[in-house]
Image: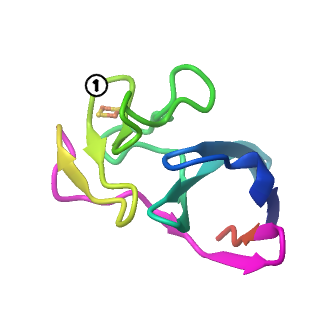
Amino acid sequence: MIEVKKKELIGEGSTIKFEYQKEGVTQSGFVVFFEGQYHAYLNQCRHMLIELDYKPNEFMDDQRQWIVCSTHGAIYHPKSGECISGPCRGESLQKLNVTESNDVLWIEIN
Ligand code: FES
């Protein structure tokens, strides 16, 4: 489980990146606050094994409405993780379970 403080996510479309170890390899994920809810995903584009953020923690477009892969521009819906445009259209980011507890979010790592 990864712990994220809610206060680190300020405003619609804000994100926070986190890293963790899996089988000796550093992996990352992120949480996005969107339409009043928290959603967490693995930080991995669905068309190549590339992290979505070229600049750390820059996951969203300028309007903070869409998750964007900075390498080839795939666009994902923040709520469902579905790719709606780009080379991975129709696929979805891998969602991670989020549990809220007071001012903390717990992210379940598979
Ligand atoms: S690696 Fe993200 S669209 Fe290609």
Mark 1 residue's CB less than 8 Å from ligand 1: yes
Residue 45 drawn at (x, y percent):
39, 42
Amino acid identity at mark 1: His
Left or right of residue 58, residue 27 in this image:
right
Q: Position of residue 73 (x, y in %)?
A: 27, 28
Outermost residue to the front? 11
Q: Nearer the viewer, residue 31 or 25?
A: 31
Q: Position of residue 96 (x, y in %)?
A: 57, 68
- Percent of width and height locating residue 76: 31, 49
Inspect this view and state whether residue 23 appears. no
The residue tagged 1 is 72
Name the residue located 44 percent from the left edge and 63 percent from the top edge: 35
Give the SS element for disc 1: loop
Q: Quadrant of the N terminus?
A: bottom right
From the image, which quarter does the C terminus lie in? bottom right
The quarter of the displayed image where residue 72 is located: top left
10 Å crowding of disc 1: few (<14), some (14-19), many (20+)? few
Bounds of the magenta span?
Answer: 87-105
Looking at the image, residue 22 sits to the left or right of residue 47; the answer is right
Ligand 1: give its quadrant: top left
